[in-house]
Image (spheres, rainbow, N blue to C red):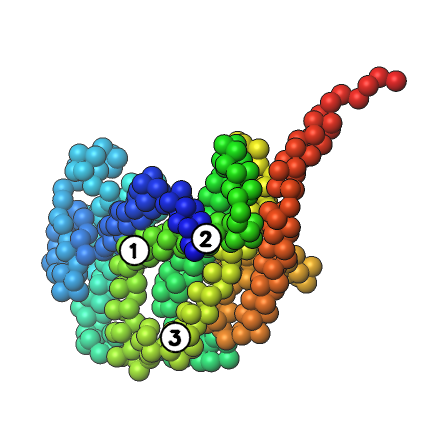
Amino acid sequence: MKFRNLLKKELSELITPQAIFSMIFTMVLLIFMGQIMGSAMEEGFDTSEINICNMDNTEFTEKVLSQLEEKGSKPNMVTISGEDYAAELERLDLNSVIVIPEGFADSILVDKKPAELRYVSELGIGFSGTMSSVSASDSVSAILDTATDEILLQTYGMNEDEIARIKEPVQTVEFTTFSGKTANISAMSLSSVLMMQSMIAPFVIFFLLMMASQMIMTAISTEKIDKTLETLLSAPVPRITVLMAKLVAAVIVALLNALSMMIGFFFYMTGMMGNVTDMVQTETTAVAEATGALNIAEAMNALGLSLGVGEYLLFGLQLFVTVAIGLAISLILGALAEDAKSVQNLTMPIMIMVMIPFFITMFMNVNEMSMGIKAVMYIIPFTHSYLAINNLMAGNMLLFWGGFVYQIIFFAVCMFFAVRIFTTDKIFTMTGALSEMFKKQQQPKAKK
């Protein structure tokens, strides 16, 4: 009963209207940003509409353009006056245009030499602008490919089957291996799906640990400032019960934050990468029908990349232990806090322990590092959390369970010191002793 009352007290102090608003706002903001990014990427990758200025106006170029329409492109015919392309793009309110100059067909059919095709594009700033430029350049390739078909048809009298055999004399069949397994699929086809899966967990762990540690340290420092902590610890309640109530309440609130963050980040990644993933899946399905290759779902199952319910439960269990470690460290550091300002400085150790493995595991493979660096990385308990999903997908259960056992031992050690601090008067004397030590270090040395 005492524990339940203390837990209610701690939850009422942590789950405030401001905290609920922060959770909802963060989730909605991530979803909104994902939709914006998704729209930008969809527009950037869209090659269906091509801006073309046809100054040649010959039967050959007209046939090339008609072939583009049959292949799904929509040529938007515009008129360019002069070669001041910057002014013309601004006048037409376009980002890019393909110019087929006069004499294009004669150069190919009469002079038997490469014709000039002009591609004008406005330099895009940012990711969406870059994707737009890449997609527009694909349109140039489509025109060149269609022109090649027409040359082979008109000049050499080849039929479509002969042209296809000349342009693609070799049919490439790609295989991908992972963790000792092989699947008939291109590795690039799986990259976007795997990237979305592998990025969600590290971001959730990162933000969850930062929010949870900041939250419990601020709560402890506030109680110390308001002198309510002394009253609470002097009440006829075991101090270990008070400590556990604070820890459980912080875990509950942290998991609520994690849930809102995970939902928001899932929709963010889905909105941002969803269109690209759909395009890859459509392309992969077409290739699978033509070559007998596997589609993405089948390939992920064949390579062991699809996690089952058991694997997700194991990851959830490790996530819980990860949060518990962060909160245990925060309890120790919170005992050193004098005021809200000092909390910012005391969160630095946790930030370092969270950020270093976060950025390294995102861009590098820890298992391929030297033994010294690898040992340092594995000493940091949060590294094992970032690697959990990859270890489960790769079937590296020894690394997973080894990291999990290490995290439990690390948590037990941190909780031992946290209990020693909260069950003795050190919770009140540590701050004063630390302040005196800093003051002595900052005092100028007396002149001899």
Estimate the x, y position of residue 240 in percent, counting from the top left. Answer: 56, 53
Residue type, numbered disc 1: Phe
Quadrant in which the N terminus is drawn: bottom left
Which mark, by number, is residue 267? 1
- Number of the front mark, 2 or 1: 2
Q: Which quadrant of the view contains residue 64? A: bottom left
Of label 3 and label 2, which has the lower sequence position?
2
Q: Secondary structure at mark 3?
A: loop
Q: Secondary structure at mark 2?
A: helix
Mark 2 and mark 1: Cα distance apart in space: 41 Å
Q: Which quadrant of the view contains residue 296? A: bottom left
The residue indicated by pointer 3 is 308
Which mark, by number, is residue 362? none
* Residue found 76% across the figure and 21% down from its top: 444
- Number of the front mark, 3 or 2: 2
The residue indicated by pointer 2 is 2
